[in-house]
Image (cartoon, grey):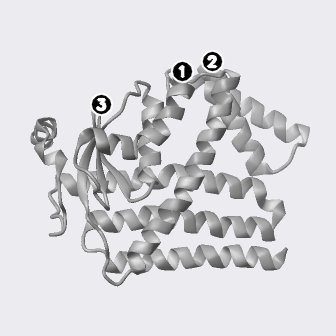
Amino acid sequence: MKNFFIVFLILMIVWVLLNNTFQPDILLVGAVIAFFASAFLCKRCELFADMNFTPKGIIYTIIFLGVFMIDLIKSNLDVTRRVLNPALPIKPGIVEVKTKLKSKFARMLLANSITLTPGTLTVDVKDDSFFIHWIDVKDEDVKVASKEIVEKFEKYLEVIYG
Amino acid sequence: MELLGAIVTLMGSLVLLVASIGLLRMPDVYNRLQVGTKATTLGTILTLFGLLILMPGWWGKLILLIFFVMMTNPVSSHVLARASYFIKIPFTDRTVVDKLKVSSKAQKIEYEEK
């Protein structure tokens, strides 16, 4: 039931943003279509089942988005510096990091965020390990690499997805 | 207002220019993907954001576009990197470590996929 409401809400938001209006007839058409789409096509949408909809979870979601945007800009400046430097200062390699997250959706968010942070790209995921292509390998050790890459996002995702 | 929008759009284009230079300069597939993901994301977001300042009436669609770019871009580069790894596209000579090769689980998956 919770999944149904979340999917319905997302479809409605997309519909309103696309139409860019709050006229009642358009809203009604959107609501009917969104209701049937989420009722029939989403019997096993388990993606959002483990999200905490408490005030703390919502506040941490906003903080996470802020941290993510700052990191996105930092990563771009870092990559720009490397590309424009005549010596091309890269030291690439694939390192292994461990995550404590259990929820599938949280892991997807973590892998996506890693792909967008300074010089890191998720290549493969096996059980608890993420294999990450790092443009500037500072340390090959699993623990040090986990601390450098994963921890800054993990502490927020842990609260949001329990 | 128009000037601000133009400046933001110009910044986005500059980021995209850096991404294209990076594509030419980087030595192997994986490093090219790195540049491709990061610079393209910020470049697209800045360009769309500049458009948002110029045309405030389009905000709903533009925000949806920014959201879709942010969700799909990392997924596609992850899949490309994974595929290139498993069909054994070689690394550059400057690569220092490859933990995925050492992992026995990875070898098992590789065997199954043949």
Viewer-closest of B76 and B105: B105
Estimate the spatial distance between the alpha carbons at disc 2 and disc 3, rounded to whole Å: 28 Å
Q: Within 10 angstroms of label 2, few (less than 14), some, or many (20 or more) residues? A: few
- Name the residue type under label 2: Lys
Please give the residue where the numbered disc 2 appears in the rendered image: A2
Res. A128 mark: 3
- Name the residue type under label 1: Ala
Q: How many marks?
A: 3
Q: In the rendered image of this protein, does residue B4 appear above or below residue A112?
A: below
Q: The disc numbered 1 marks a residue on which chain?
A: A
Estimate the spatial distance between the alpha carbons at disc 1 and disc 2, rounded to whole Å: 7 Å
Q: Residue furthest top?
A: A1
Q: Earlier in the sequence, mark 1 or mark 3?
A: 1
Q: The disc numbered 2 marks a residue on which chain?
A: A
Please give the residue where the numbered disc 1 appears in the rendered image: A49
Find residue B83 and report its horizontal and vertical position in percent: 25, 53
Dot 2 lies on which element?
helix
Estimate the spatial distance between the alpha carbons at disc 1 and disc 3, rounded to whole Å: 20 Å
Q: Residue at x 55, y 56 (%)?
A: B69
